[in-house]
Amino acid sequence: MNPEELRERQKTVLPDWISLNYERPMELVRGEGFKVWDSEGNEYLDLFGGIVTTISGHNVPEIVEAVQKQASKIMHSSTLYMIESQVKLAEKLISLSPISGDQKVFFVGSGSEANEAALLFATNFRASSEVIALRGSYHGGSFGTMSITGQSSWRSTSRSALDVSYAVNPHPSYSPMNRGGDFATAAAEDVRDVIETTTTGHVAAFIAEPIQGVGGFIEPPRGYFERVKGILDESGILFISDEVQTAFGRTGSHFWGIEAHGIEPDLITMAKGLGNGLAIGAVMGRSEIIDSISPKLHISTFGGNHISSAGALANIEFILENDLQKNADEVGGYLKDCLSKMAESHSIVGEIRGRGLMLGIEMIEDDGSPNPKAAAAFLEACRERGVLVGKGGLRSNTTRISPPLTLTREAAKQAADVFEEVLSKVGSKEKVV
Ligand SMILES: Cc1ncc(COP(=O)(O)O)c(C=O)c1O
């Protein structure tokens, strides 16, 4: 179907608030590795991977085969019956976990559900409904996860079953606390202040993304999480690492995002890259926390079903066997260098952020204020030149780059050449075409 007709039909039957990229929205109908094709036959480098999800690439034979094989046997049985691939997947994840001691995994269907479940376990275990989140965070679209999301544009309600307090966004450009000095310590001390001044003192958990995804690929300074963990440990507050975007080698330097900060969380939530596009999410962590809701029952009908577990298992094996983490480190490092060089000659670039294949380009005005128009123009102009990127940030002024981790250096160079050309145009304030 042509995109104009599909757009008209979508408008009639799907909600207005579903946000579509591009003035002329497109449908992607085919993918191969890090390339995708739209319904009009145009080819693109996919540098956003379906919102940081297609981690191993499109149409990967090993994953497709695992899904097809499983689909032809049995698609659904529910967790009332054992599922071998689900058990194997849990075993694999635990073997890769940065958490020590006995652990369990609970499978769900999405990142929001994974965070909901983590909050359920943490609040039960600690007998407290109080949670600390970070400003600028994004944790999902369900009631519970919206109430720990620190961006008003993603909060269509303020209703919550949790008592949530927010600490400052631990990034110098995004925090009113940036007055020079040791910012990592100042921001971590804000968590202590939040505990002491806005809670009863008996808090269940602190939740954070190792790199804020939707927030624009913002990574806290070194030492921040370590100091926060020390403060939390003083009163037994749990640390939940939301790895929905950072997990499975995407950051290049580590398999899990939180490992870059040298601390051990109590619970980890994951989704997106876990299934390479299949609907699966999970909470992994200390057994005593996850088992704490016993003897109450809890279930996710679709969580870790036959197909998503078989596919996710093949996907994790593909990531490990092909050492995609190393590739993310090398190709991501190369791309970051290219972007950093570009930033020197383009004043429209405020900052190049991120690590591995999770890179952000922040666009600013001459006076340093956010420039969402430039980020939007950049997105459009890249599309015209065959490169798909994403957008994010509290002010929508950050370009997000998160391709499949199979991206080659040649493809990264091709994308970098496009970025250079587009930055010159966006930066020159001419109409970008
Ligand atoms: C860090 C983080 N947590 C949770 C979620 C929610 O995941 P889902 O959209 O699968 O519910 C997202 C989605 O973008 C995310 O980026």
Image: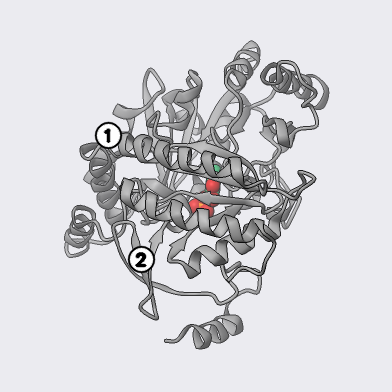
The image position of residue 397, as x and y in percent, is: 66, 52
Q: Residue 36 carries which label?
A: 2
Element carrying mark 1: helix
Colour setting:
one colour
Q: Distance between the residues labelled 2 and 1?
A: 30 Å
The residue at 77%/26% (across/down) is 178
Disc 1 crowd, CA 10 A, few/some/many (<14, 14-19, 20+): some
- Name the side, left or right, on which 359 lies relative to 227: left
Disc 2 crowd, CA 10 A, few/some/many (<14, 14-19, 20+): many
The residue at 56%/77% (across/down) is 24
Amino acid at pointer 2? Val
Q: Which mark is residue 103?
A: none
**The one of 5 and 368 positioned closer to us in this rendering:** 368
- Quadrant of the frame with the N terminus: bottom left
Amino acid at pointer 1? Lys
**Relative height, residue 8 to residue 220 (above, below):** below
Query: Label 1, on which residue?
Result: 92
**The one of 79 and 380 positioned closer to us in this rendering:** 380
Element carrying mark 2: strand
**The one of 103 and 177 positioned closer to us in this rendering:** 177
